[in-house]
């Protein structure tokens, strides 16, 4: 938090504390779901302004119970932040919206600077790690976002230590690059509680460095890879890196 806050970067989790899914790696709980709070977008924007943020990451729980998966609430939050802080960059870390292209259009119309959607793990491990998600659907979200707006930078994230094999990680990197993905974060999976899926192994910092090199060689413009790297780690620096690569 200190590292990010000192760089005027912060992440907001919107649409409540509870999720409609139950990924085996995630500490977010299932529980009662209310409608999104209509005042939330304005409050997020005001908090971002007060914190003098220059790079705002907006993410959410997955809300499969809502007709648009919460896309319009997401878009309204982006718009309010951009209105309140016109020079702030906004990155959205979105759920898959069950592959609903209309929902993706709604969030894309709010003009985020970066669209992030985490692939999380390799295809083979989806049934045990993300049973309610779909590897191909997640790739399609990234691909579709690029189709809607070719100038938006796309980003994804991968955890290591869940039992994936090196060849499977390489395949995932290739799939993401084929989907047009510009940026990648790679971090160590840590078990949030005894109820969650166990850590298969701890990956050495040297191996993370190797994966960064491999990912760059595969075609990503920017990669953050290390034991403590999470989706929004050094988000602004990654954005600036990819921007300088294209200009
Ligand atoms: S969908 Fe996202 S927030 Fe919900 S349990 Fe899975 S990782 Fe956690």
Image: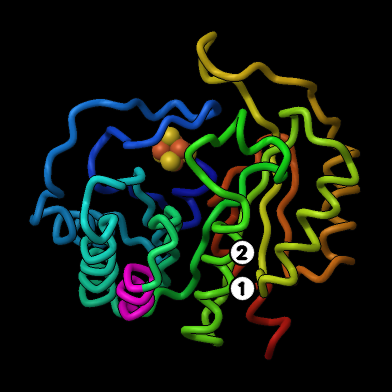
Image quarter of residue 137: bottom right
Ligand 1 sits in quadrant = top left
Q: Position of residue 10 (x, y in %)?
A: 41, 51
Residue 43: tell me if it is visible: yes
Q: Residue furthest top?
A: 194
Q: Which sits in the foreground, 10 or 145? A: 145
Q: Crowdedness of circle 2 by 10 Å Cα count: few (<14), some, many (20+)?
A: some
Q: Residue at x 33, y 68 (%)?
A: 103
Q: Which sits in the foreground, 161 or 22? A: 22
The quadrant the C terminus occupies is bottom right
Residue 1: tell me if it is visible: no
| Residue that label 1 marks | 240
Q: Secondary structure at mark 2?
A: helix
Label 2 within 8 A of ligand 1 by Cβ: no
How far, Cα to Cα, is label 2 from label 1? 5 Å
Task: State the extent of the magenta-drawn residues as a range.
Answer: 102-110
Q: Position of residue 90 (x, y in %)?
A: 40, 68
Q: Which sits in the foreground, 204 or 105? A: 105
Q: Is residue 108 magenta?
A: yes
| Residue that label 2 marks | 237
Q: Is residue 80 left or right of residue 226?
A: left
Q: Which sits in the foreground, 229 or 193? A: 193
Task: Please say if 197 is above or below 125.
Answer: above
Q: Which mark is residue 11?
A: none
Q: Which secondary structure dominates the residues rendered in magenta?
A: helix
Q: Residue at x 30, y 74 (%)?
A: 106
Q: Is residue 175 magenta?
A: no
Image quarter of residue 71: bottom left
Tell me if label 2 and label 1 are in contact, CB under 8 Å. yes
Q: Residue at x 18, y 35 (%)?
A: 33
């Amino acid at each position: 938090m200190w590292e990010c806050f000192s760089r005027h970067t912060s992440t907001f989790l919107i649409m409540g504390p509870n999720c409609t899914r139950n990924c085996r790696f995630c500490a977010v709980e299932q529980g009662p779901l209310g409608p999104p709070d209509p005042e939330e977008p304005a409050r997020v924007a005001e908090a971002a302004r007060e914190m003098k943020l220059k790079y705002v990451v907006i993410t959410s729980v997955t809300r499969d119970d809502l007709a648009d998966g919460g896309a319009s609430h997401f878009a309204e939050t982006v718009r309010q932040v951009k209105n309140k802080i016109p020079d702030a960059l906004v990155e959205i870390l979105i759920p898959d919206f069950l592959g609903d292209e209309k929902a993706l259009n709604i969030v894309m119309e709010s003009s985020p600077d970066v669209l992030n959607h985490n692939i999380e793990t390799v295809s083979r491990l989806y049934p045990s790690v993300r049973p309610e998600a779909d590897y191909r659907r997640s790739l399609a979200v990234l691909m579709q976002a690029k189709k809607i707006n070719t100038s938006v930078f796309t980003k994804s994230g991968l955890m290591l230590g869940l039992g994936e094999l090196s060849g499977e990680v390489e395949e995932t990197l290739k799939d993401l690059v084929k989907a047009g993905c510009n940026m990648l974060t790679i971090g160590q999976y840590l078990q949030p509680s005894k109820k969650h899926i166990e850590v298969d192994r701890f990956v050495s910092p040297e191996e993370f460095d190797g994966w960064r090199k491999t990912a760059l060689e595969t075609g990503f413009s920017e990669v953050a890879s290390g034991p403590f790297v999470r989706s929004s780690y050094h988000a602004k620096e990654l954005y600036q890196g990819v921007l300088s690569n294209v200009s």
